[in-house]
Amino acid sequence: FRIKGFFRDYRKHRTTKLVLVLHSWELAFLALISAWLWPAPAWLWFAVGGWIFHLVCDQIFNRVGFPFYFLSYRFLKGFERSRLPCPQGESQP
């Protein structure tokens, strides 16, 4: 496993599975609730806020549809790229 090769393969859609754990509303809101319930330092609030802002921007600008950003949806599809509504064959920036 090499990180450079991973990103190259991902951008060229050579990966067969898309887990994308941090691209999920469930975990982002779990982090938000955790920060709310337990005393969290300011940097954690900013990190969670940035995470949620990133997900909102992805929802607006990516062409994969709303359910794609739920880990449970991708889990039900077996994390198989071919079963998910993501553009096939296009290089991503």
Image (tube, rainbow, N blue to C red):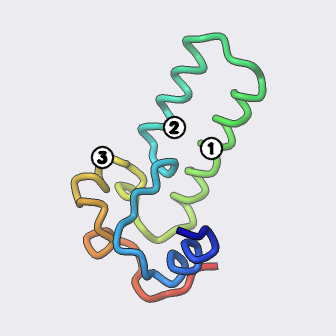
Query: Label 2 is placed on what type of residue?
Result: Ala
Nearest the eye: 62 or 38 = 38
Q: Quick one: which residue is furthest to the front in this view?
A: 1
Q: Which mark is residue 51?
A: 1
Left or right position of 76 against 63? left
The residues tagged by marks 2 and 1 sit, at their Cα atoms, a distance apart of 7 Å
State the residue at coordinates (51%, 22%).
Answer: 33
Kindly identify which residue carries mark 3.
Answer: 72
Kindly identify which residue carries mark 2.
Answer: 28
Query: Label 3 is placed on what type of residue?
Result: Ser
Q: Earlier in the sequence, mark 1 or mark 3?
A: 1
The residues tagged by marks 1 and 3 sit, at their Cα atoms, a distance apart of 18 Å
- Residue 44 position, x and y percent, is 70, 28
Secondary structure of residue under mark 2: helix
- Residue 54 position, x and y percent, is 62, 51
Q: Which of the 4 quarters of the picture holds residue 84? A: bottom left
